[in-house]
Amino acid sequence: MNDEFILVTGSHGLIGKAVCGRLVRAHNRVLFADLRASNAFDICDSNKMEIAASQVTGIIHLAAVSRVIDAECDPNLCHSVNVDGTRQILQVALRSKLKPWFIYASSREVYGHQHDKVVHEDFDLAPVNIYGRSKLGAERLVAAAREDGLKTAILRFSGVYGALNDHADRVVPAFVAAALRGGVLRVDGPDCAFDFTHIDDVASGVLAVADQLAAGEQRLPPIHFVSGRRTSLKALAECAIAAGNGRGRFVVAPPRNFDVHEFVGDPTRARALLGWQTTVALEEGLSKLAGLMQKDRESETEGAQA
């Protein structure tokens, strides 16, 4: 895919930055929309969204209140951004003469509790927290927009990690940073287990879907990008400590009551429809992240001494 003009919301986030970089390298034009961007493009600004949607041929909608704990702290903001913001973008896309294709970034949280199961995309959707319910609400809006003629795709992400522009207190960067300091890793539920996916693999998957939509595909089912590997938080802490050259130790705490406690996904659909599969194993991804963090710390130290 090249020569597309694509609006990326959440362009400065973990996934957005990686996706935008690949789009630009593939000779696409990108319109960046993020509160952290220099143009401070807010997806809730109806006038700016109307202008943007009238120009672009594709939209990759990543912007959101993107963390379970943030949604619990401010449910109204979560609904406003994740549901109402998505509704507004879909409406302006439908009004656009260009009818841009539309990718929506959803989450494993829509599946809710699925203990001891490898989860397929067609499992019942039963979110257990505010964030998951907001994502499911937005998915339903995307499905309705497809019925109204928009080319859409729903992608569900799980435990994405691997770059410096992440929330520092998310589990993977928090564990790796603590390990590098020789500090303490707090494990909220050692037996809680998840499916972690490296940002490089996720970005590749997003672009593979964009390629299909740009080529005219209209009936892609929901797809999640997962490794199919179950990793407990205790095992994750141990891997992070190893990536930090054996420094650090972990302490155990009870799981949070608003979190899903286990998720492992089935990657079969992504492989069958896109030829996609994970290429970065967890141990390699944590080691890469530790290297990036170490270089970043060294650069900061050199800058302070200069």
Image: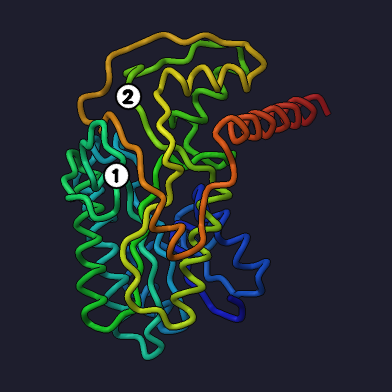
Residue drawn where x is 55% and y is 22% of the image = 240
Q: Is residue 256 above or below residue 269?
A: above
Residue nearest the viewer, comparing 226 with 62: 226
Judged from the image, the secondary structure of the residue bearing numbered disc 2 is: loop
> Measured from the top left, where is residue 245 in percent x and y?
67, 16
- Left of 55 or right of it: where is 66? left
| Real-space Cα separation, disc 1 to disc 2, in angstroms | 16 Å
Q: Is residue 303 above or below residue 216?
A: above
> Measured from the top left, where is residue 69 in percent x and y?
29, 34
Residue drawn where x is 49% and y is 25% of the image = 174
Number of the label disc, if any, that sits on residue 119: 1
Q: Quadrant of the C terminus?
A: top right
- Name which quarter of the figure residue 195 lies in: top left
Residue drawn where x is 52% and y is 17% of the image = 238
Query: Which residue corresponds to mark 2?
Result: 192
- Left of 164 or right of it: where is 212? left
Question: Which residue is outermost to the right?
Answer: 306
Q: Quadrant of the N terminus?
A: bottom right
Label 1 environment density (alpha carbons within 10 Å; few <14, some 14–19, many ≥20): many
Q: Is residue 87 above or below residue 215?
A: above
- How many numbered badges does the structure rendering display? 2
Q: Is residue 64 above or below residue 90?
A: above
Number of the label disc, if any, that sits on residue 101: none
Q: Amino acid at mark 1?
A: Val
Mark 1 or mark 2, whichever is nearer to me: 1
